[in-house]
């Protein structure tokens, strides 16, 4: 990418961030805190007069530090998506804790909400609100999670609308891998609250942090496939999540084989028109954001496919796809750079699994999987291969669907096992063959075309002199050799090692070349038929323009095939 294009991309990022920051509501509101008066010394009379009153009425205004300019995108996201974290544990010794003021008791704990949900304890707190454990007062042993907004945010229309959006989106999805919403109600002070299923476990981010940053391939793939199932149900309901990340993937149930739950649909995009999400706004987490989402363009379910691929990349390698110092640099890298190959960070990753993740994270959405179900099917063999003991019924069904869908068409055509490694090898051979045939077609076609024009322009229709034909052939071959050398160098440096990009490049090269050769051969046979049956003379010698027309017909056929492919990818 040139410096001009890089500057233009950076300007697009900053413009989109500015729009997002203007549209989103940040949580940097000033907070007024009134400190309690210090206790009077022993034996001293109680304070009186204006001095005591002034002390009691004095208030300290605490303003959060202004965010750096580079964190505008992160601030916009914090205002919409809520990552709940447990409250910080107390610090210090017992003696110092005894001297400090007692911690403020949460006023919601111990109360009953909507006449049915008794609030037991605070589970966690985030930038948007708090989550509590509640028990149903009429159904013993039934626990729920209650999520509500901070009081200062409950007065802001945009935050309220997104809170309502989260409840509606999650409630409309029927999947065991999406957190279930049971009720939407209000607290006694008017704040809205969501009653959801109680989840006992940990987030994927906590699991990664406690396991050295990455997971075994089988475990990571199993988690990713369950995320695919949950997001596929959301897509079926017309909902694009737009913020899939480890913090929004919760693992509950048996720690040895947990169930995945997808959380936080606060910035999801629905099929219904809305002013909360519009083109030009950058919402989401930059590290897992699709390039078109980073640019503020219109998105579709393939943006979630990229995010699942990015999460799987992180789980397999222990690193985010793009590690940068600030969100602006991350957004720019998402749009303009390729992440390091997975096997360069973790050589234990199977080559086929690397190819699946690379395809899911393709820069162009047309190069990604068509649906979450397709991604889950391609991941299925790696979950089954890594699982000990007999394969599960789910993995067996997924493997059958892979065979029926025939994603390994080349491998099956040559009688090889259907695997990503054999498919990648055959794809590279096909690209090499297509390029060789294409260069040969161009060389021979250009020589015959130019020779035909030269003979047609001269008074003598005979063939060119030996010296002229040799010079013409050498000139064309040298030109094609230079073009082929430059193109081959670019492909080797940028595409050859990337299985996903090679898979996308193969049909783009092979189809036009095959169509051109078929068109040239068919037109040549037609000319020979006309010569032998109708005219009974060699028109190729009598009228040299035929040589040029045959090549031009093949060029037009190749161009039409390439255009058809391009239009199909744009749809």
Image: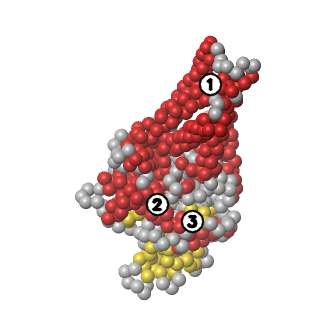
Q: Position of residue 273 (x, y in %)?
A: 67, 66
Q: Which residue occupies 66% across, 23% down?
A: 451
Q: Nearer the viewer, residue 383 or 189?
A: 383
**Residue at label 1?**
447
Looking at the rendered image, the disc whose residue lies closer to the viewer, 2 or 1, is 1
Q: Position of residue 317 (x, y in %)?
A: 40, 45
**Residue at label 3?**
239
Give the label on residue 258, or none: none
Relative to residue 537, is residue 239 depicted above or below? Answer: below
Q: Is residue 129 visible?
A: no
Sequence order check, earlier mark of 1 and 3: 3
Q: Could you tell me which secondary element the residue under label 3 belongs to?
A: strand
User: Which of the 4 image quadrants contains residue 547?
Assistant: top right
Looking at the rendered image, the disc whose residue lies closer to the viewer, 1 or 3, is 1
Q: CA distance from mark 3 to mark 2?
A: 15 Å
Q: Could you tell me which secondary element the residue under label 1 belongs to?
A: helix
Q: Position of residue 235 (x, y in %)?
A: 54, 64
Q: Nearer the viewer, residue 296 or 246?
A: 296
Q: Are marks 2 and 1 in contact (CB under 8 Å)?
A: no
Q: Which residue occupies 62% across, 62% down?
A: 31
Sequence order check, earlier mark of 2 and 1: 2
Q: Could you tell me which secondary element the residue under label 2 belongs to?
A: helix
Q: CA distance from mark 1 to mark 3?
A: 56 Å
Mark 3 crowd level (few <14, some 14–19, many ≥20, 10 Å Cα): many
- Left or right of 16, for residue 250: left
Q: Quadrant of the N terminus?
A: top right
Give the label on residue 373, or none: 2
């Amino acid at each position: 990418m040139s410096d001009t294009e890089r500057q233009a991309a950076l300007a697009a990022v900053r413009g989109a961030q500015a729009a997002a920051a203007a549209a989103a509501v940040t949580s940097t509101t000033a907070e007024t805190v009134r400190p309690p008066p210090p206790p009077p010394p022993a034996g001293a009379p109680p304070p009186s007069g204006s001095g005591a009153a002034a002390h009691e009425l004095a208030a300290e205004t605490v303003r959060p530090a202004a965010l750096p300019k580079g964190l505008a995108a992160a601030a916009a996201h914090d205002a919409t998506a809520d990552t709940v974290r447990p409250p910080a544990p107390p610090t210090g010794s017992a003696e110092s804790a005894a001297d400090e003021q007692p911690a403020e008791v949460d006023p919601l704990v111990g109360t009953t909400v909507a006449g049915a949900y008794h609030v037991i304890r605070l589970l966690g707190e985030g930038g948007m609100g708090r989550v509590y454990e509640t028990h149903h007062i009429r159904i013993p042993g039934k626990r729920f999670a209650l999520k509500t907004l901070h009081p200062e945010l409950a007065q802001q229309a945009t935050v309220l609308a997104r809170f309502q959006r989260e409840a509606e989106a999650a409630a409309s999805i029927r999947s065991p891998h999406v957190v279930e919403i049971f009720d939407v109600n209000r607290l006694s002070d008017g704040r809205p609250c969501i009653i959801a299923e109680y989840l006992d476990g940990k987030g994927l981010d906590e699991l990664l942090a406690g396991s050295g940053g990455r997971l075994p391939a089988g475990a990571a793939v199993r988690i990713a496939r369950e995320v695919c199932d949950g997001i596929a149900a959301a897509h079926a309901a017309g909902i694009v999540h737009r913020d899939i990340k480890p913090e929004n993937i919760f693992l509950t149930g048996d720690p040895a084989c947990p169930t995945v739950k997808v959380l936080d649909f606060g910035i999801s995009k629905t099929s219904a028109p809305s002013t909360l999400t519009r083109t030009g706004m950058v919402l989401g987490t930059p590290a897992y954001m699709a390039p078109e989402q980073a640019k503020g363009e219109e998105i579709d379910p393939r943006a979630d496919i990229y995010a699942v691929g990015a999460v799987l990349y992180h789980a397999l390698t222990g690193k985010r796809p793009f590690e940068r110092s600030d969100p602006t640099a991350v957004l720019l890298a998402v749009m303009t750079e390729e992440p390091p190959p997975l096997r360069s960070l973790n050589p234990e990753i199977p080559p086929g699994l690397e190819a699946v993740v690379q395809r899911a994270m393709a820069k162009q959405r047309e190069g990604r999987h068509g649906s979450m179900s397709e991604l889950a099917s391609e991941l299925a063999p790696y979950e089954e291969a890594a699982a000990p003991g007999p394969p599960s019924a789910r993995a067996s069904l997924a493997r059958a669907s892979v065979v029926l869908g025939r994603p390994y068409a080349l491998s099956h055509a040559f009688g090889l096992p259907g695997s990503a490694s054999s498919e990648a090898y055959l794809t590279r051979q096909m690209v090499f063959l297509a390029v060789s045939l294409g260069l040969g077609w161009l060389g021979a076609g250009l020589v015959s075309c130019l020779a035909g024009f030269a003979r047609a322009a001269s008074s003598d229709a005979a063939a060119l002199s030996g010296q002229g034909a040799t010079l013409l052939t050498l000139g064309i071959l040298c030109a094609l050799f230079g073009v082929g050398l430059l193109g081959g160098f670019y492909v080797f440096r940028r595409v050859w090692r990337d299985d996903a990009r090679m898979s996308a490049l193969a049909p783009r090269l092979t189809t036009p070349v095959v169509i051109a050769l078929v068109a040239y051969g068919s037109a040549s046979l037609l000319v020979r038929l006309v010569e032998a049956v109708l005219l009974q003379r060699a028109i190729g010698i009598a009228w040299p323009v035929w040589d040029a027309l045959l090549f031009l017909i093949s060029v037009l056929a190749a161009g039409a095939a390439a255009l058809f492919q391009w239009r199909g990818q744009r749809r």
